[in-house]
Amino acid sequence: MRILETPDFEMTNNCVLVPTMGALHGGHTSLIQAAVRRARIEGVPSAVSIFVNPKQFNEQSDFDQYPDRMNDDIAICKEQGVDIVFNPSVDVVYPQHQDVLSNVIIPEIASKPGLEDLYRPGHFEGVCKVVSRLFDLCNPSAAVFGEKDWQQLQCIRTMSKLQNRSLEMIPAQTVREDSGLAMSSRNLNLSDEARIQAVALSQALFSSSHVNTPELAQSLMREMLENNGIIPEYAVIRPSATLMPIPDPAVPFHKPCRALIAAMVGGVRLIDNAPWTPVAYA
Ligand code: PAF
């Protein structure tokens, strides 16, 4: 396995990329495994980028406190059979005096749905910038992103299409602990008590799948969360691709949907989502 600070010919001549900010956990491992599998099939190298993107943090303190576990991350990549770890500096990603972001297109889904965009204004703008730069630098033929960050996945998909990129997006399913809790770097900050309480998020998502209208599903999710002492920032059903509000949630909706939740649990902000299909049409 090679560790690069600047791209080299082997990487830019097609690779399967997993963009990360490091602090790798079991959720990342499944993205990495998907990339390694695909890269072996294609006969190209697998690459994991590790770059903590300053442009996507709403609070400077969050950026400053972001865990640095480079040695562990490298060990995980090695263990998973990754060919290249790409660990660029800020200067490589955002060189001064060069207009490297002029091709970035921020899609509407980054700021319109009233989900993450409402609670983390500007976040997806930062994500689009860094992902576009990583795509420019690494020139991957395919890139793997987790479904756990559903709005992020849709932003990146839409941006890539608008930029006419020919790379394939490989979505990877959310990895859950035995309790149902979605794996996330933020889980490290949960107290034992909050970790138990946080299981209500996945329970709420799954409990909402047995009804036939978005409105009923939303009220079931909220009830499940509130019964566990959680007041969500949002707990909604939205069309999977656009994420825009459903015009009349009281009637069955016929397009593929996603149930999405964000909530503070024990001082830690968690997000989760799952597919949602009205029961009558399942
Ligand atoms: O999901 C993440 O870890 C980050 O948002 C990403 C896609 C690596 C961009 O910094």
Image (cartoon, grey):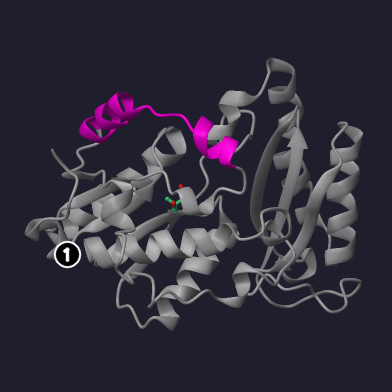
In the picture provided, is 32 more to the left or to the right than 258?
left
Say if the magenta span includes residue 78.
yes
Which three-letter amino acid code belongs to the residue tagged 1?
Answer: Asn
Residue at the far front in the pictured view: 97
As helix, strand or loop, the secondary structure at mark 1 comes to loop
Q: Which residue is mark 1?
A: 14
Point out the stretch of residues depicted in magenta. 60-79
Residue found at x 55% / y 76% = 107
Q: Locate residue 128, reporting x and y percent.
A: 47, 65
**Label 1 crowding class (10 Å Cα cut-off): few <14, some 14-19, many 20+?**
many
Q: Quadrant of residue 265?
A: top right
Which quadrant holds the N terminus? top left
In the picture provided, is 72 more to the left or to the right than 214?
left
Residue toward you, 53 or 172: 53
Say if the magenta span includes residue 120.
no
Q: Locate residue 96, reporting x and y percent.
A: 31, 60
Residue found at x 65% / y 52% = 273
Residue toward you, 181 or 166: 166
Residue 208 visible to an observer of this rendering: yes
Which quadrant holds the C terminus? bottom right
Q: Quadrant of residue 248?
A: bottom right
